[in-house]
Image (cartoon, coloured by chain):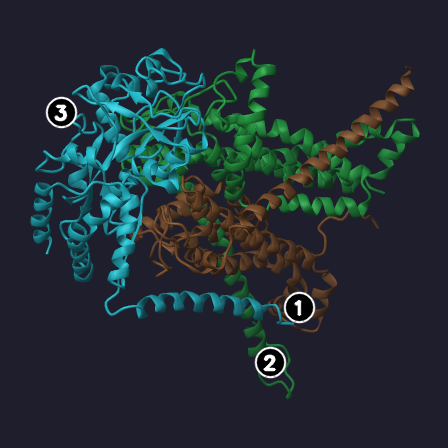
Chain colours: A brown, B green, C cyan
Amino acid sequence: MNRLTYRKAVNYVMLTATGVCTVLTVSVLFVILGYLVYNGGKSIDWDFLTKLPLPPGQDGGGMANAIVGSALMVGVGALLGLPVGFMGGVYLAEFSGKTLGFAVRYMADLLNGVPSIVIGIFAWGAIVVPMHSFSALAGGFALSLMIVPITVRSTEQFLLSVPRALREGALALGAPKWKVISTVVVPAASKGILTGMILGVARVAGETAPLLFTALNNDFWPSGLNQPTAALPVMIYKHAISPFDDWHRQAWAAGLVLLTMVLATNIAARWIMGRGVSAQKG
Amino acid sequence: MAAPAITANQPRRQSILSRLHGGDTVAHLFTLVFASSVLLVTVLLVWMLWSSSGMTRAKFGFQFFTGTNWDPVAGDFGALPFIWGTVLTSVLALIISVPLGVGAAIFLAELAPARLSDSCTFLVELLAAVPSVIYGLLAIFTLVPLMRLYVEPFLKRTLGFLPLFQGPAYGGGYLTAGVILAIMTFPFIISISREALMEVPRDQREAALALGATKWESTIQVVVPFARLGILGSIFLGLARALGETMAVTMVIGNDPNIHLSLLAPGYTMASLIANEFAEANDALHLSALIEIALVLFLITIVINALARLLVIATRGKGTAHSA
Amino acid sequence: MKNWKMPIVFGVAILGLAAVAAGQTKKAAAAKPVSMNASGASFPEFIYKRWFSDYKNSHPGIEINYQGGGSGQGIKDLTAGSVDFAASDRPLTDAEFAAARQPLYFPTVLGAVVVAYNLPSVKQPLKMTPEVVAGIFLLKIAKWNDPRIAEINKGVTLPGDDITVVHRTDGSGTTFVFTEYLAKVSPEWKAGPGTGQTVKWPGGLGQAQNPGVAGAIKQTPGAVGYVEMTYVLDPKSRGNMEMASIKNSSGEFVTASVASATLAGSAAADFPTSITNSPIKGAYPISTFTYLLIPSKIADPDKKAALAGFLKWMLVEGQKTAPELFYAPLPKPVLAKDQKQLAQLQ
C-alpha cells in the first residue's frame, strides 16, 4: 500500500474512532436516564411522595419528609447564599478595585473548587459544634457555601456583559451609579443572573457529603431549623447500601425524583439562556 | 464640598447631590461587605483546617504522608493508603476519560455539523449535573455486577500475568471507582476541549489542508497542539473534580485502608475516609488526623484547580489574539 | 424592569413560609409534643425504630428520631450533647464514661452477632469452629473450599471461589463484641487485631453500619461478614444470606436464634457485662446485651417524663415485640434491675 492510501486509511479510522468516542460518551447519559426511569418509574407511587418512612423490614412508606427536608435545606442555602453571591458579583463587576477584586475573585474560585466533604467539615465546626446539635441550619449553611461562589462568578460575568453604552446612557441622564446598576444594568443582565442562580441551586440540591454530619437524618417531618433533618440524597445513600429490597426500590424512586428535578432545572436554565458556546460561527 | 450655582427651581440641589453621592458610597460599602464575607469565609475555612489539624501535624510531621498504618485505637495515623487510593483512582479515571473525551471533543469540534455538535454537547454537559449519589446508586446495582461478571474475569484471563490484575475480583475496588470517576469527568473534558478546539483559527486548519494533509493529520498535528493548553486545562479540571469526589467512590471502592497493587482490589480514598469516620471520631487525635486529611485534600484540589484555570485562561487569550 | 426581583422575593417568601408552617404543624399535632433525637448502635436499630414508631402510634406527639450511626457515634454525640440519649452495644471505657457525664446503662434486648455469608450454590448451612472464623477474618483462609472448612462440613460441596471478607468502617459495638469473642478463642487474633470498636483488619471490604455490611454481603457472592442475626433471619433483608453455626466452648455447633441468645444471657444479673463464649449449654457464643445510654441528669422536664414513659413501656410492651424481630427479651434479673434503675430516673 502506498503512503497516500495508508494516510487515507488512518484518516478514516481515526475520524471514525472519534465518532465512536462521541457515541459512547453521549450514550452514557441515556443509559443513566434509562436505568433510573425504568427502575425508578416502577418504584415510584403516591405513597412514596406523601408518606413517612416505615421502620426497616416493613415494605412501603415513603420519603415525603426527605423531599420536604431537602427543599427546606436548599431553601435555607439559597436564602443565605444567593444574596451574598449576588451582591458580591455586583461588587466585583461595578465597584471593585484591582487588589480587592482579584482577592475576592480568587477566593470565590477557591471556594468553588473545595470538595463538598471539606465544606461539610467547616459547617460542622461553625454551626454544629457551637449549637450542640445537628440541624437543618447547619446543612443549609453548608449548601450556601457552595452556592455563593457559583453565584458570585456568574453574576459578575453577566453584569460585565452588559454593553457600556447602556450604562453610559443612563449616567448621562444624571442617574447616580447605584441607580444605574439597580434599574438598568441588573435588569439587562437579569436573564443570565437568574440562570446562574438556578443552576447553582440545582447543583447543591443533589449534594450528600456536606449533609452527612451537619443535618444527620430524621425519620419524621422537619420540625425546626435547629433539628436534624432528612434529605433526599442522604436517604438514597443509606437505602442503597442496605440489604432491604424495598429500600432499594425506594432508592431508585428517590433517584428518579432527584434526577428529574436537577435535570429539569438545568434544561430550563439553559433554555432561558439559549445555548452556551454555539458551534455556529457568525 | 463647594455648592454649585443653584437656581430658584431647585432649592435643595446641594443636599440631593450629597445624598446621591452618599447613595453611591453606601452601595459600594454594602456590596463590599458581601464580597468581603466571601473572602472572610474562605480564610476562616483555611484557618479552621490548619488549626484543627495541629495535633497530628505536631505529632507526625511529614511521617503522616509516608505512614501506612491508620489505627485510631493506637493513635497511629499514616495517610499513604488514602493518598494512594485517591491518586490511583483519579489517574485511572483520566486514563479512561481523556482519550474518550478528547476524541469526542475532536469529533464535535471538527467533524460534526453545528446542530449535532451543539445538541451532543448539551447532553454531555447535563451529565455534569447528575448528583454523585446517583452515580453511586447506579454503580452498586449495575456497574459492580458488570465488572464482577464480565469485565474483571476478562481482564484476569488476558492480563492476569500483571500484578495489576491479580487477586480476587469481587466487582468493586480501584478500577470500578476509576470507571465511575471517568464518567463524572467526561463532561468537563469534552465541553472545555471542544471550546478550545473551536477557538483555533480557521487559517491554521486551512493552511495544513492546503499543504495536502488529511483531515485527521490537520487535526492531530495542527489544531490539537494549538489548543493543547485548553485541553490540558480541561483535564486538570476533570482531575480536580475526581480527587474530591466522595459518595460515588465510597459506595464502590471497598473502603480497605491498605495499599494494594491490583486494580481489582478494594481501596480507600481521602474523601471516603472522612465520610466514613468523621461522624464518630470522638478522640481529639483522631479528629485532628481526619482534618489533616481534609487539609491535604483541600490543598491538592486548590493547586490543580488553579493550574486548570490558568491553562484555560491562557488559551482563551491566545485564540482571540490570533484570529482574523 | 423590576420583574426579575419579584419571582425571587416570592420564591424566598414561599420557602420561608413553608419552613414556618412545617414548624407549626409539628406543634399542632398533640397536647404536649416532645421531640427527641438519639443516635448510636446499628445492631438494635431494627427494633429501636420499630419501638419508636409503635410508641408514637400509641402516644401521639412523642417523636423519637433514632439514627444508627454506630455505637462509636452514639457515644460521641452523647458526650457532645448533640443528642438526648444514645445507644451502644459495648460498655464505655472509664475515660469515655467520665466525659459523657456518667450516663445510665439501660439494657434493652439480647442479640447475636452472626457470621453471615453469601454462597448461593451451598444449600446446607455451614459449620464453623472458632479457629476457622478467626482464620477467615485474618485472611489466612482464602478460598471457600479450603480443607479447614471442608473437614468440618463433610458432605457439603464447597465452591472454589475466593472469600471476600466484609467488616465495618465505623466505630461499632458489633465489631467490639465480635472481636472480643475472637480474642477469647484465638490467641492469634488477640495478638493481632485484638478487641475494639475499630480494629486493624488484615483486609477485606468495609461498609458503614450493620445494614451496610449486610447489604454488601448480600450483593457480593462469596462474601462473608459479621452482622446482627436479624439482618439474616428477616426475610425482607435475607436474600441469599445464610449464617454459620459456630462451635461453642462445650463442643456443640450452635445456630444463632432467639432461644440460643436467651440461653447465653440467662446467667447475667448485672450490667454492663460480657456474655460472649458463654459456657452455658446450647448458648450461642457470640451473643450480647445492647444498651441505651441515658444521661443521669436531664434538664428538660418534658423530655425526662417522655423518656421515662418510653423506657417503662419498653420494659413491658417492647419486650413482647422482640422475638418477632429476632431479638431476645431481657432475662428476669436484668429486667428487674432495669426497672429499679428507672425509678432512679424519675
The residue depicted at 11 percent of the width and 51 percent of the height is C342
Eyeballing the image, is B275 above or below A220?
A: above
- The tag on residue C279 is 3
Amino acid type at circle 2 is Arg
Q: Residue furthest bottom?
A: B8
Query: The numbered mark 3 sits on a residue in which chain?
Result: C
- The chain under label 2 reads B
Relative to residue A233, is residue C329 drawn left or right? left
Distance from disc 2 to disc 3, alpha carbons, whole Å, reads 99 Å
Q: How many other residues sit within 10 Å of disc 2, few (<14), some (14-19) or many (≥20)?
A: some
Residue at screen point 35% across, 61% down: A224
**Foreground residue among C160 and C62:** C160
Element assignment for label 2? helix
Report the Cα–Cα distance between label 1 and label 2: 24 Å
Residue B61, position as x, y percentages in the image: 36, 25
**Residue at the disc numbered 1:** A184
Residue A11, numbered circle: none
Instruction: Give the quadrant of the N terminus of chain B.
Output: bottom right
